[in-house]
Amino acid sequence: SYIKSSWKNVGLVQSTLKNVGLVQSVFLDPCVHLLRYLLLLRNLEITDMPLAHGHSPFVILPAPTHLPTTTAAALERFTVNFTITNLPYTSDLENPDSAKFKATQRVMNTLLDRLLKESSIGPVFQGCETTDFRPGSHRDETRVDAVCSYSKEASAAPLDRVGLYHQVSNKTRGITQLGPYSLDKDSLFVNGERRSSLSLLCSAKAALAQCCPWPTSSS
């Protein structure tokens, strides 16, 4: 009878412990979640710190400070157009999904990237994307259209098309060679700027300087 009584006491203890767990899960856990929610509403960060008995007291940390926002540089684009004289134009270059178009595009992108990274816009240069291939005046010619981009701060000067044109001209041996390709020396456009307009501008400046020289101060 003593043994039976002991087993009953053990069962009572187990039942009591289960009830305690039930009370904790029904009443304590919702309170915990409610407290978490209220603290989050106050912009506080809460983390758990596990202890030996599996309890997780709350550790309240200060809300992170917001760093001052800086104005990101704008992405500016410009076009580059030129004609290759030793790349025959084929129907495959009309289709952007063709293997020849993609392969030729990769080569052109790489050549233009290398060229412009060594120019005055090199530190802010982002890359070039060849967008189109068009037939030239002869069957061995292919016209190339590309769009290039660079990062421009709000206070920075606009793109110097004339200066960039001269740099590209110098780095392509007077607009005659780009990698393995031969170029039509009169075909280069940098954001719409080409040699004829530059020559006209320089001629006008020279004529103005000759006809209307700046007065010099007499000693």
Image (cartoon, grey):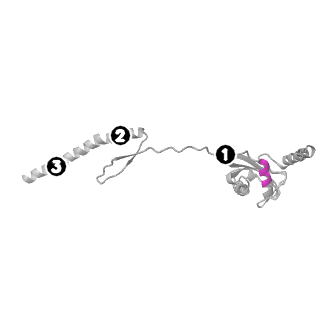
**Cα gap from disc 2 to disc 1, whole angstroms:** 47 Å
The amino acid marked with disc number 1 is: Glu
Mark found first going from the N terminus, 3 or 2: 3
Asked if residue 126 can be seen in this view, the reply is no
- Indicate the secondary structure of the residue bearing disc 2: helix
The amino acid marked with disc number 3 is: Gly
Mark found first going from the N terminus, 1 or 3: 3
Range of residues picked out in magenta: 161-167
Give the residue at mark 1: 153
- Residue 92, horizontal then vertical, whole percent: 74, 53
Image side of residue 52 versus residue 12, left or right? right
User: Majority secondary structure of the magenta segment?
Assistant: helix
Give the residue at mark 2: 35
Give the residue at mark 3: 11
- Indicate the secondary structure of the residue bearing disc 1: loop
Frontmost residue, 188 versus 103: 188
Image side of residue 116 versus residue 27, left or right? right
- Residue 80, horizontal then vertical, whole percent: 76, 49
Determine if the magenta segment contains residue 165.
Answer: yes
**Which residue lies at the image location 84% right of the left edge and 48% below the top edge?**
198
**Cα gap from disc 1 to disc 3, whole angstroms:** 77 Å
Frontmost residue, 12 versus 104: 12
- Indicate the secondary structure of the residue bearing disc 3: helix
- Is 71 placed above or below 172 here? above
